Image (cartoon, coloured by chain):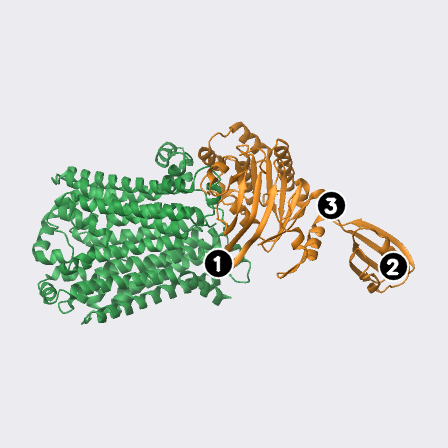
Chain colours: A green, B orange
Amino acid sequence: MLRSLYWKTLRDRWLGALVGVASLFLVAWMGLWAYSGMGDAAAEFIDTMPPVYQSLTGTTADAGVAGLMLGQMFNFLAPFVVAGLGISIGAGAIAGEESQRTMSILGSVPLSRTRLLGAKALAIATMVIVSSVVMWASYVLAVLLVGGDVGSLDLAAATLHLCVVALFYAAMALAIGAATGSRGVASGMATAYLVSSFLVVGFAPLFDGWGIVAKFFPWYVLNGSQPLANGVQWGQLSILVALIGGLMWVAWWRLNGRDLREGEPRAHFVDRLRSDPRLTAVISRLSGTGATGGIGAKALSDVRALAIVAGGGIFVLLVVMGPMFTAMVDSLAGIVSAMPEALLAMVGFADYSTAQGWYHGEGLSVTGPIAIAVVTISAGLGLVREERNRTIGLLHTAPISRAAVAWRKAGAMVVLAGLMGVLIFAGLSLGNLIAGLSMDYGNIAAASVLSAGLGCVLGAVAFAVGAVWGRTSVALGVAISVALLGWGINSFVAVNASLEPFARVSPFYYYSNNFPLVNGMDWGHALVLFAAAAVLVAIGVFGYQRRDLRG
Amino acid sequence: MSAENPAIRVVELTKKFGDFTAVDSVSFDIARGEIFGFLGPNGAGKSTTIRALVDLIRPTSGRCEVLGLDSRKDSVEIRRHLGFLPADLALYPNLTGRQTLEFLANLRGGVDWSWVSALADRLDADLSKRVGELSSGNRQKIGLIQAFMHRPTVVILDEPITGLDPLVQLEFHTLMREHASAGNTLFLSSHTISEVERVADRVGFIRRGRLISVEKMSELQDKALRRITLEFAQPVPVTAFHGVEGVHEASASGATITAQYEGAMGPLLQVATAYDVLSISSASVDLDEIFLEFYRDKVEGPDHEVGQGDSAGKKH
C-alpha cells in the first residue's frame, strides 16, 4: 500500500522533473558550446578574471569555460529549478490531497497518517535526489559534448549541496502544507523564502557588516561556500539536514494533531484580514470588489493577488535599488574596475559602476523578467484553466462567441503585462529620482515598454498552447521552457559574437540585448516582441474556436 | 427561429474520440413546451450529446439544432435563449453565490434580479457564501438558478438533481413544470428513471452511444411489468413457467413462485391452475425495474442490440 502511494507520487511528477532537468541540460550545453566556440579568447579572458569574480561564480583558474558556465548554473538556475520542483511536490503532498478531496479516500485505507507522511516524504526525497543526480550527469555530458574538461571542479560536491538545499525547501513546503492543509500557503511561503534567500544572499554581502545575514538563508550553502571550488562543506550541510529533520517533525506533529480537510477551502486570507474592523477599509480598497463585471475583469481579478505581490515586489526592489547604488557605488566600482570590459560583455554583466548597469544587471536581467513572467504566464493560462477547472461549460452558457471569450482572456494578459511595465517604469523612475541618478526617463520608458513586450510574449506562449491544446500542464511547461531556454540562449549563446544570430530566436534578446537603459528604445525589437505576441494570441484564438473543449 | 421548428433537433449525430464512438447516429426531436427525459447508464453518451448541442464539442458527423438554429454556426444566438446546467457542475470557488450569478448575468444581460431572488428563495439557496464553502447540493442550487435566471426558452439540464435533498427536488420539479407550462422546453438528462418519471412527457433511452428508443411516458407506463406471487400447496417446478407467453422471469422459493409478466395474465394462470394454488397476489413493478428490464430486453451486449433497428431514432 505504501509502495503504491510512493510510486503514484513519483508517477504524477516525473514529467515535470524531466522537463526541468532537460531545460537545465540544454541551457548548460548551449552556454558551454558558446563559450568553447570562442577558443583561446575565452581562456584568456578567464585567466584575467580577478579573484573576486572567481569567488562569485565559483570558478577556479584552471576550470576553464566549464567552470564559468557550471558555476552560473549551480549558483542560479539549477537551485531555482530543483528547489522549485521540491516545493511543488512538497506543497501538494498532503495539502494537495486535501484540496483535491482525495484525502478522504486515502484516509479510508488502513494506513496511519504517519505512514502516509512517510511515503510522501520518501517520494519527494527520491524525486529531488534523482533529479539532482540526473542534472549532474547531464552537466558532465554537456561538458563532454563540447569536448571540454571539468578539471578540478567538484561537480559532485555542488550537486550534493544543491540537493540538500532543495530538500530543505521541499521539507519546508511539506511541513507547512501538513500543518495548514493549504497548498497555496505552503507553496507561497516556501517560494517566498526561496526567492528572498536568493536576493538576500546576493545583496547582503555587498553591504559592510551585513554579510553575516546571508548565512541565515539556505542559499548561502550554494554560492556562499562555493562547493564547486571548495568541495563539500559538511558543517553547513549538517545544519541543513538537522533543520530538515525539524521540519519533518513539525509536519508529523501537526498532521497527527489536526482535522483533515475535505476540500473545503479555508476562509480566504484576505477575508480574515477584512474581518478585522481596523483593516476592513484598507483591505477592501486593495482587494477590490467582486470581479463580476465581465470575462476580462474576472480574468484580471483572478491574478490580482499574484500581480500585487510580483508587481509590488519589483516596484519596491527597483525603488530601493536607487539609494542602494548610491551607498555602494564606490565598492562596486572597485570590483568592476578589476574586471576587463570584454569579460563583462562576455558574461552579460552590465557595467555596475553606472546606475544603468546596476539596474540592468540586478533589476532587469533576472528579477524583473521573473516577476513579469510569473504574472503574464499565469494570466495567459486563464483560458485553459477554465477547462481544467471545468467551468468552461458554465462560461459558454453566455451568448458570447468562443473567439470573444478567448480575446478577452488574452486582453487581460496584455493589460497585466502593461501594468507590470508601468510598475517597472514607476519603480525605476522613483529610484532614479530619490537617489538622483540622472538616468534618462525616455530610456527608462523604453526598458519598461520592452519589459511589457517580453511579458506579452511569455504570456502569449502560455495562452496559445493552452488555447490550442487544452492542457494547463502542457501550456505551463512550454511557457516555462520558453522562458528558461530563452533566457539561457540570450545570456550564454549571445556572448559568442559568431553565435549571436542564434540568440535572435530568444525573446530575451529583443528585451535586453540593446541595453535600453543606456541606448533607449529599439523600435525594431519592440515590434518583434509585440508582433510575436499578437501572432501567438491569434493562433491561440484560431485553434480555440476549432476544437472540442475539455472539462 | 420559426415557431414551427422543434425546440431541439438532433440529426444523425455521431461523435468519435479517436477510435471510440461516444455517440452513434443519434436522432430525435423535442417539441416546444415539452419536457424530455434523456435516460441512460453512466457513459451512455448523454453528456456527449448535450455538449454537442451546446457547442462545447463538435459533431464528427450529423448536426444539432436548437430553435431551428444550427448548434455550431448560430451558437451565440442559441445561448441567448438557452439555459444550461452542465453535469458535475464546477463553479468559481472564490466567488460567492451572488457574485457567480452577477458574473454570469453581466455576460448575458437582461436578467431580472427579482426573479433571481425568487428562485433563490424557492430553492433555499444561500447566495452569501463563497461557492467553495458550499456543499455539493448547495452548489447545485446556484447552477440551477443560473440556468433559469433569464427565463430561457430552452433549458438543458445534465443530471440536475445531483446532491439536492428531497424537498428541494420537489420544488425543482414544480419549477420545471411551471416553466414548461409557459411554453418553454426542458431537456433533462438523468440515469435514474424515477427522476424523469415525475416530470417528463417523453423519454429517450440511450446506451453505448446509440438511441434505443423514444417513448411517451404514458405509453412506457402501460408497458409496465407486473409481479405475481403464487403460493402453492406444495413445491412446483419453476420450469413450468418458462416460455409462458408474457412471462419475463420466474423464480421459486419453497412452494412459492414469483414471476414478472406483461400483458394478459391468462396464459400464466392457465399454467398455475394446473397445480394446487393456495393464493395469488399481484403488484406493479416500479419504473426503475422497467428501466432495467427495458435494457435487458433491448440490449444484451455491445454487438447485439435487439430491437434497435426498429426503434432507434424514432421520432414523435
Q: Is residue A535 visible?
A: yes
Q: Position of residue B260 (x, y in %)?
A: 78, 55
Eye-nearest disc, 3 or 1 = 1
Spatial CA distance of label 1 from label 2 is 53 Å
Q: Quadrant of the C terminus of chain B?
A: top right
**Residue A47 position (above or below residue B170):** below
**Residue A20 position (above or below residue A420):** below
Residue at image x 67%, y 40%?
B201
> Circles 3 and 1: CB distance less than 8 Å?
no
Identified by mark 1, the residue type is Gly
| Element class at badge 2 | helix
Residue at image x 48%, y 61%?
A116
Which numbered disc covers residue A365? none
| Element class at badge 3 | helix
Pointer 2 residue: B271
Which numbered disc covers residue B18? 1
Q: Position of residue B264 (x, y in %)?
A: 83, 51
> Circles 2 and 3: CB distance less than 8 Å?
no
Marked residue chain, label 2? B
Pointer 3 residue: B221
Q: In this rendering, would A178 be left or right of B205? A: left
The answer to which image quadrant residue A487 occupies is bottom left
Identified by mark 2, the residue type is Val
Dot 2 or dot 3, earlier in sequence: 3
Eye-nearest disc, 1 or 2 = 1
The answer to which image quadrant residue A452 occupies is top left
Q: In this rendering, would B291 be left or right of A114? A: right
Front residue (pair B7, B5)? B5
